[in-house]
Amino acid sequence: MSNNIINLQDYRTPGSRVFTGRDRGMDVRKRSQIDLIETQNTEVIIQIPEDIGSINPSFLEELLVNVVTKLQADVFFQKFKFVNNGRYKITKDLQEAVERILREETALIH
């Protein structure tokens, strides 16, 4: 296994077809060590199980909050690749999560 790949299958509740909730996102962030992996690699691959039906923006916000805040949107989208051979398309949910993270960061600064 490569040290730049986070396979969400490793953090999946058996039988579940969704990743949802801030608590789960925070748990996966800590257990996957995504923040450390980001600092040690030029590219990070997040593998989504084929049969996943949904990954909610709230889950993604907590999973990605530190790396998105650090890298900002353009660099984040260059560095992080989401791989899914199934039917679920993460683009809309991911974009919403990134926008929320950056909007909250801006709101806190003012």
Image (cartoon, grey):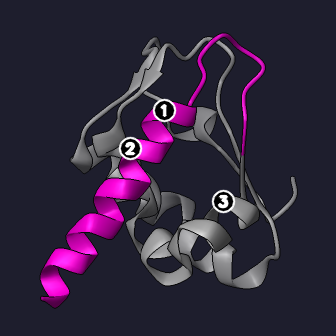
- Measured as percent of width and height from the top left, residue 33 is found at 55, 68
Q: Looking at the image, which is closer to me, 13 or 100?
A: 100
Q: Main secondary structure of the magenta part?
A: helix
Q: CA distance from mark 1 to mark 3?
A: 13 Å
Residue 67 circle label: none
Q: Work out which residue is located at the far right of the displayed protein and give it.
A: 2
Q: CA distance from mark 2 to mark 1?
A: 6 Å
Q: Looking at the image, which is closer to me, 15 or 45?
A: 45
Measured along the vertical axis of the image, is residue 66 above or below residue 100? below
Q: Looking at the image, which is closer to me, 10 or 47?
A: 47
Q: Which residue is under mark 1?
A: 92
x 67%, y 84%: residue: 39
Report the span colored magenta: 82-110
x 44%, y 35%: residue: 93
x 15%, y 76%: residue: 107
Q: Which residue is under mark 3?
A: 77
Q: Secondary structure at mark 3?
A: helix
Quadrant of the image containing the C terminus: bottom left
Q: Looking at the image, which is closer to me, 44 or 94?
A: 94
